[in-house]
Image (cartoon, rainbow, N blue to C red):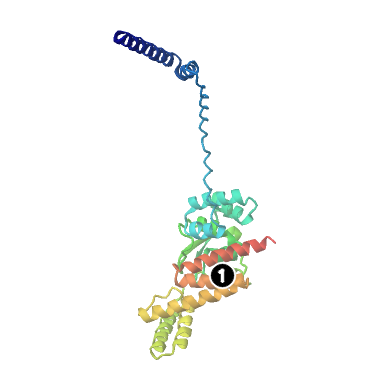
Amino acid sequence: MRIFVQNFRYVRSAQVCRALMLASSVLLAGGLGGCAELRARMGGHAAPAPAAAPAPVSAALPPAAEVPPPSLAAIVNQQLQLGHYAEGERQLRRFLEVNPDDRVAQALLRQLTVDPEQALGHASRQYVVQPGDSYSTLAARYLGDGGRFLILARYNRSTNPSVLRAGQKLRLPASRLVSTDAPEGAAQEQRAAPASASSEARARRLQDESVALLHKGQRTQALERMDEALDADPGLPSAGADAQALRQQLVSVYHQRAIVLYRDQQLDQAISLWNRVLAIQPDFEPATVYRARALELKQRLKQF
């Protein structure tokens, strides 16, 4: 009996080993299919094959937002007025891509790209800059259009059209001189001498009087006297801290008046005041910005 049980266990173990070997061969031969076949042979149900993983979809990145071109006033103020002609031309071309019908931008681009000698002529006359002059006022007076300041500046090889000082010598095209603000014509062209010694002495005397009035506590009278001094000579050097403080206050007053005129669209008067501000203080940036806007608005109004 004991021998029979041992033989039975031996036979049973052999059968289990053969079953395991069969299962291993099926798995090795058929992978997942062999596993399913094995389950079928053993009475189980085959598991469905896993679904194929979807192909990765590359996410489309949104295009980078394009930076809009600066405004025309910013181009004039930050590039052209400061003599950055190459960058100004690049920004003007970008501006015209968005605003192809803008005539002011077209005119400015032409002034940047044409030969100023060919456009204005080789023959020229000398002009000595007067207090309050700018390339815009000279272009309006002698070329008939203040918006042509850029080509006049290039005609004089200016590297910074925003800076123009009394006594500086310029070239004006002889064939295109058009006096628009004085009936005497030829006499206007001859107005080329710098401020005389007597006017300079008078300006210094008025400035000294304004400081004396300030020390007496008469601020209003001091400002009026300083106004007269700078009217006689906007390039008058400042005599001390008190004189400089009065000049700064006058510049602020002029600027605020010009803003009111600008909002009322009295553009010529506003531009004239900003010209005066810049003659006194060339680096006064608010006047430069507003003056450029006024010139741009004036050109736009001419189109209607």
Quarter of the image where one finds residue 183:
bottom right
Q: Is residue 243 left or right of residue 134?
A: left
Which of the image's four quarters has the C terminus?
bottom right
Q: Is residue 35 left or right of residue 96?
A: left
Residue 189 in percent (x, y) is at 56, 67
Quarter of the image where one finds residue 31:
top left
Mark 1 is surrounded, within 10 Å at the Cα level, by few (under 14), some (14 to 19) or many (20 or more) other residues, namely many
In the orientation shown, which residue stands out farthest toward the left?
Answer: 2
Q: Residue at x 46, y 85 (%)?
A: 225
The answer to which of 133 and 195 lies nearer the viewer is 133
Residue 52 in percent (x, y) is at 52, 27
The answer to which of 178 and 50 lies nearer the viewer is 50
Q: Amino acid at mark 1?
A: Ile
Q: Residue at x 41, y 90 (%)?
A: 217
Residue 245 in percent (x, y) is at 40, 79
Residue 218 in percent (x, y) is at 44, 90
Q: Is residue 115 left or right of residue 23?
A: right
Would residue 247 be seen by someone viewing this image from the given angle?
yes
In the orientation shown, which residue stands out farthest toward the right?
Answer: 304
Question: Which residue is disc 1 drawn over?
Answer: 271
Question: What is the number of callouts on the image?
Answer: 1
Q: Residue at x 41, y 15 (%)?
A: 23
Would residue 177 be seen by someone viewing this image from the given angle?
no
